[in-house]
Image: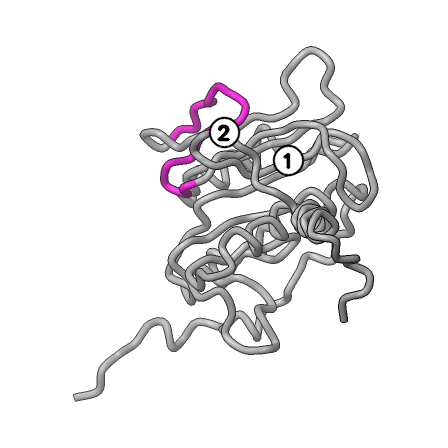
Amino acid sequence: MLEYNPLACLPSSEELPDSDDTPVDNELQDLIPSLLKAVLAMAWADRMDWFFGADMAVYYDPNLPAIVPDGFLSLGVERFFDENLRLSYAIWEEEKVPILVLEVVSQTYRGEYTTKKNEYAKLKVLYYVVYNPTRRRKQHLEVYKLVNNEYQLLSGNPVWLPEVGLGIGIERGIYHGITREWLYWYNEQERRLLTPEERAQMLAQRLRELGIDPDSLP
């Protein structure tokens, strides 16, 4: 008797478009997710059970267009399959819905507080993070948690995410030589995780304290 595997009938991530061909609206929509991903790559260097995507197509139904968050985090998935890496993220293939989705609001709203928020709730994304740097009267960072199929706004900065094992928050810092407010990951003691540049600077300082010129090292 033949066994029917419904997943075998679905397209793989390699067969699906890898983006919606819509360019990011501004540089922050590229830099903020890349900073969060770079910090995770250092903090979770020994872990292979996570994936952070930036401006990547996420497919939840083979008959519907993908959603393309500015950033998203999935846990319990392979960090990478081979050297060609992922082209897109198909939920039926990964068997995991992203645990966190990030949207960086540009000058023109793209449904971050309405359409997208409802879509992520339907997909049961646990945390929905919205960063809006242009707000004057409301907080720039909003972190929502899905409770009874509805998103509830969490308070604090940083906001602790127990299912992720990290907190997320905003503070001023330097990234790519740019001083401004950035999104960062935090540990349970609310200490910010260092960026790769900050780790390199600390190492260079320690070497100098030992009388070693870091520029002389191969």
The stretch of residues the image draws in magenta is 150-165
Could you say which disc has been placed on residue 42 in the image? none
Compared across the picture, whether 58 is left or right of 17 comes to left
Query: Few, some or many C-alpha atoms within 10 Å of disc 1 (few <14, some 14-19, many ≥20)?
Result: some
Q: Quadrant of residue 113?
A: top right
Q: Nearer the viewer, residue 200 or 162?
A: 200
- The residue lying at 42 percent from left, 54 percent from top is 75
**Which marked residue is nearer to the observer: mark 2 or mark 1?**
2
Residue 198 magenta: no
Which residue occupies the extreme front position in the image?
Answer: 211
- The residue lying at 47 percent from left, 36 percent from top is 187
Q: In what element is the residue under mark 2?
A: loop
Q: In x, y percent, where is residue 158?
A: 53, 27
Mark nearer the N terminus (2 vs 1): 1
Q: Nearer the viewer, residue 188 or 91?
A: 188
Q: Which residue is mark 1?
A: 183
Could you say which disc has been placed on residue 190 in the image? 2
Gap in angstroms between the C-alphas marked 2 and 1: 13 Å
Q: Amino acid at mark 1?
A: Leu
Q: In x, y percent, where is residue 32?
A: 69, 42
